[in-house]
Image (cartoon, rainbow, N blue to C red):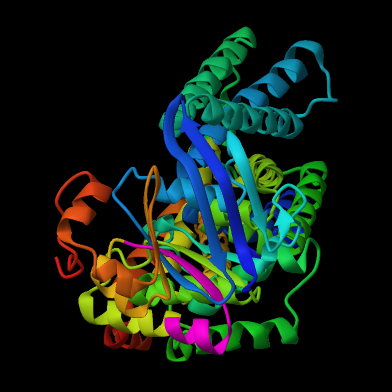
Amino acid sequence: MTESVVTMNKIHYAYDNKPVLSNVNFEIPRGALMGLIGPNGGGKTTLIKLILGLLKPDNGSISLFGQPINKFKEWNKIGFVSQKSNTFNKGFPATVFEVVSMGLTAKIGYLKFLTKQHKEIILQAIEQVGMSDYAHQNVGNLSGGQQQRVFIARSLVNDPELLILDEPTVGVDHENVQRFYDLLERLNNKRNITLLLVTHDTGIITEHATDIVCLNRTLHFHGDPKEYTSLTDRDLSNFYGHPVNVVSHDH
Amino acid sequence: MLADIIEYDFLRNTFLTGLLIGIIAPLLGTFIVVRRLSLIADALSHVTLAGIAFGLLLEKKFAATIVTPLYGGMAFSVIGSIFIEKLRGVYKAYEELAIPIILSGGVGLSLIFISLADGFNTELFNFLFGSVSAVSQKDFLSILGISIFVIIVIFLFYKELFTLSFDEEHASVSGIHAKRIHFLFIILTALVIAASIRIVGVLLVSALMTLPVASAMRLARGFKQTIILSVIFGELAVVLGLFSGYYFSIPPGGTIVLVSIIILLLSISAKRFTFNSKRERESA
């Protein structure tokens, strides 16, 4: 049996009495590249916040790396690139190197400074996302896709075992989306990072993911991409509550 | 002026104090600008004026010398900064509302203290627009102390302040005590403003915290470079501003700001000739 990095058991969550998640049972096996899809307001971001411990479920239990979430301490095992990452202040005068170095701030701790070793780790992470040529450019001058790579590198410096990305390809043009997914696959295969990816690219994700999860208040589908693509349009309409076109990534 | 600086104590104090605030105002100003808090500096400088007026009132009415205008200004500035933080918490969706509230409160209080003291003309004028002759030995030593404190704290907490300025949410999630670091930052801001007022004056103190940074951001690559360039521009503005203010008998606040604006205009037009921007265009 494969070990799971996240286990959610009978999760219920409501914002001001409006249920967002009800009876969600869900597992992320180690080594997965999981695509989390579903309509807006279907609870995708809430689910992520629960995993990150930013919200507490009203009911049900969550385990991270086999430990109950309230006992879990190794938060640096989990990297997170938020949806907000691409709304940062584009005029902020920081180089790629400086942005990636921020990933280490908390780990290094107060009253301590970046050492040569840290600098190596930072340069390595920048190389892994293919941004070495831009290490000393201001991050605001890069394209949306390049900026997302930088934010992934900022997570990589902490050597995460699970990397969560919330709609990382919003505002990235089509050609670069493809390269972005190639990068994610590389991280998944070469560094054995488990990935959870919230996305609207229902077409492209099925080409790259090992697992697809479809969430609209509760889980409507959990399986491999082949099964997902074999679903009929009518099945999908039932999940979403309205008709959908599976190949919606090139809008 | 150089000979005069050596000869007259008060000029030497002014000059050395100018050199100090030419470092600390742009240094802290870089963090203030990138966090889009430039207007907070303005609000706090007006609160500082209330503290200065309070100090002057005590001096005049009660001949009390414990609360000098500098210390009065500092105390009010720190209290004002705490109020701004509270107000920003109360009006989460309208964080900028804290600024007019505190700014008008500061001006209102100043007016009351000034009229209670039946007006104090020359000295007040010096505080509003800065002065080349206002710095006493005692004030200089206080400002020296503040400067050393501010520089050490920024040095020690540089990576936290930087991380917090770039992405507050990420900073909190990754385990940095965002609230405490921010509080430290706002206290530093209050201290720097109080220290700078002697030279540049209440009305123009925010200029010394923002204009050199605005110029540096056009030319620098990265945050550290921005800080270094800001400090260089700040020093240039203070030195040239103090000299020209002294020679033409103009309050140095005015001349320092004008020099800063000239530097800003030069940096805006220089940008297009730099190697820097060429490389950036290629990579875009």
Q: Nearer the viewer, residue A70 or A167?
A: A70
Asked whether residue B44 appears in the rendered view, the answer is: yes
Residue at 66% x, 54% y is A63
The image shows residue A230 at horizontal and vertical percentages of: 24, 70
The image shows residue A173 at horizontal and vertical percentages of: 23, 74
Quick check: A74 above or below B113?
below
Q: Quadrant of residue B81?
A: top right
Q: Nearer the viewer, residue B2 or B36?
A: B36
The image shows residue A57 at horizontal and vertical percentages of: 58, 39
Q: Nearer the viewer, residue A216 or B159?
A: A216
Quick check: A41 above or below B2?
above
Asked whether residue B96 appears in the rendered view, the answer is: no
Image quadrant where one finds the N terminus of chain A: bottom right
Q: Is residue B225 left or right of residue B62?
A: left
Q: Is A195 colored magenta in this rendering?
A: yes
Image quadrant where one finds the C terminus of chain A: bottom left
Residue at 41% x, 57% y is A83
Residue at 58% x, 69% y is A162
Residue at 22% x, 55% y is A235
Q: Which residues are magenta?
A: A185-199
The image shows residue B123 at horizontal and vertical percentages of: 62, 29
Q: Nearer the viewer, residue B82 or A126?
A: A126
Q: How many marks?
A: 0
Q: Is A102 colored magenta in this rendering?
A: no
Quick check: B118 above or below B223?
above
Q: Quadrant of residue B2?
A: bottom right
